[in-house]
Amino acid sequence: MRANQSSAPRGVKSGFTLVELLVVIAIIGILVGLLLPAVQAAREAARRMQCANNMKQIGLAMHNYESTYKRFPPGNMAGAWSTGLSVHARLLPYLEQANSYVLVDFNYAYNHPNNDLARMQNISTYLCPSDVSGNLPAALGGKNNYYGNAGTSLMAGAPPTDPSDPNFGLLPPTGVFFRDSRVGSRDITDGLSFTAAFSEKLLGDGNNGLATANSDTFRPGTFPATMDQAVNDCFAVDVNDLSKQGFSNVGAPWLWAYHSTTMYYHIAPPNTRSCMYPPGRIMTTAGSRHPGGVQVLLCDGSVQFTAQTVDLQLWRGMGTRQGGEVLSGLTD
């Protein structure tokens, strides 16, 4: 036999055995399984960064608006509470959205035909890339993930002066954006860096025949007079009881100044339930798809991530503009 001749029998080709191939596939599967969480975490980190950038743009816009008008835009622009235009509409020209701004007719309600073109616009700055959930009807209009802080009162606006009104005696709004608000930096005596301006809110499922606990607005059927009572009543709701469904079109349209479309409250911890207590008592709660908490735009324009395990009293203090609370340990 020649030295360069193979000792393998003629006609037999070398290669992987079936067992070897299965071992290689198993190893690849294990590596993919190990790498996938890291890839998903990296993608979420990028989405969270983009979300924070959106909020910073909103913060810059509200301060540019204040430079022009000496106050932040009101949470409800005009007309009755159920038909008013949102703070988001007024911020458009300061977000480089002049083309959408010119479509808004501030003389009419959000659902008037004059505002159909504006209402249907999707504004990228108002959308968190981590929240691709929700099956909101397209006819509602453009979606929104960033809500203005209305504070810790159960009221959507100023309490009534008529003693016979069921909401007589409730506290006025304590936040920055609410019905007929006229708040400027000078009015935020708790400090701009300790007071929330905006936070996140999940898009709804768009279906009152389906219960989604972390995005729907439920209707307990009670009349709480305090924050703690409102939280207890809301958390006691059986979400599988569809008669307790209140509002599922959460997050659209951004043009509408409403508690389930553009404004939230610092009453319940973030990433928990939202509830409504007609007539006129509200507890819309911040929430996000970011693991462990929500991002909050503070009135100084900075964005902080706040854990969903935050002390409730600190969270409530963050929602008031003149509460005098001493806040520490709010953010991660």
Image (cartoon, rainbow, N blue to C red):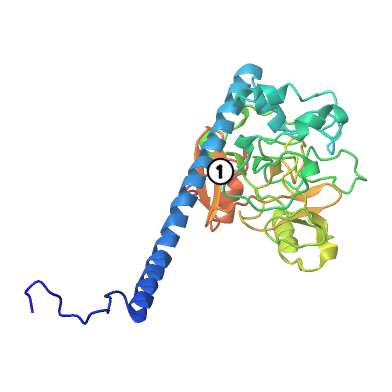
Q: Residue sitting at 65 percent across and 44 percent down?
A: 145
Q: Quadrant of residue 147?
A: top right
Is residue 180 visible to the viewer in this orientation of the structure?
no
Figure quadrant of the N terminus: bottom left
Is residue 127 visible to the viewer in this orientation of the structure?
yes
Relative height, residue 158 to residue 291 (above, below): above
Q: Residue sitting at 38 percent across and 68 percent down?
A: 28
Between residue 193 and residue 55, name the one nearer to us. Answer: 55
Left or right side of 231 for 311:
left
Q: Position of residue 83 (x, y in %)?
A: 84, 35
Q: Position of residue 303 (x, y in %)?
A: 51, 39
Left or right side of 43 for 76:
right
Q: Residue sitting at 90 percent across and 43 percent down?
A: 163
Q: Position of residue 166 (x, y in %)?
A: 88, 49
Q: Secondary structure at mark 1?
A: strand
Relative height, residue 233 to residue 19 (above, below): above
Residue ranking furthest to the right? 164
Relative height, residue 87 to residue 3 (above, below): above
Left or right side of 80 for 66:
left
Left or right side of 286 for 223:
right
Q: Position of residue 50 (x, y in %)?
A: 51, 41
Q: Quadrant of residue 237?
A: bottom right
